[in-house]
Amino acid sequence: MLGAIIQKLKAEVPDLKNRVEPVVEMAKLLRDGRLPQNATALVVPLDAKGGKAEAGTGIFRQAINERFGVYLSLDVNDATGRKALNRLHPMLTEVTLALVGWSPEPGPGVLVFERRRLLSMHQGRAFYELTFTIDAQLRTPA
């Protein structure tokens, strides 16, 4: 799923073309100051929550809700980040519109916007988090 999301962002958000990468531990990267140098956006799997499970006629099914984050990293040349604001809001809107209502995999769910927020300003960069969810289903022979 993350690969499809990355390709969608590269294709539909001009500022992110060839500047999107997958990451597993965003908190560790921020803490250690070791962010990928060429990435403007990082796509991170966050968590999944199981729903109602059903078993019947040789099939086990369970609804799940998966959550992932898109982290935008922008250069900030002043202490307040004022210069980055002109670029930030349009990019937030483009990322959101590229993903909402779209399904990265065949299945019952589409991506839904959950929230966005400023995470931090660190070492001359502003980090913004956009969170999305998708309802999916686990299926396996019982």
Image: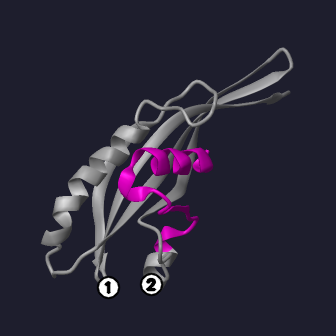
Quadrant housing residue 113: top left
Residues marked 2 and 1 touching at CB (< 8 Å): yes
Examine the structure image and report whether residue 134 is included in the region drawn in magenta. no
Query: Where is mark 2, residue-wise?
Result: 33
Query: Where is mark 1, residue-wise?
Result: 123
Of the pair 11 and 133, the residue shown nearer to us: 11
Q: Residues within 10 Å of mark 1 (few under 14, many from 20)?
A: few
Give the color scheme: rainbow, by chain, secondary structure or one colour: one colour
59 with respect to 61 (left or right):
right
41 with respect to 62 (left or right):
left
Q: Secondary structure at mark 2?
A: loop
106 with respect to 7 (left or right):
right
Taking the spot 32% from the left edge, 45% from the top edge, the residue there is 94
Q: Is residue 81 above or below residue 106?
A: below
Label 2 to label 1, Cα distance in Å? 8 Å
In the rendering, at what x and y percent does residue 52 appear?
A: 61, 28
- Looking at the image, tell me whether mark 2 or mark 1 is earlier in sequence order: 2
In the rendering, at what x and y percent does residue 140 appear?
A: 80, 30
Taking the spot 43% from the left edge, 30% from the top edge, the residue there is 101
Q: Which residue range is magenta in the image? A: 1-27
Q: Amino acid at mark 2?
A: Gly
Q: In the picture, which quadrant includes the C terminus?
A: top right
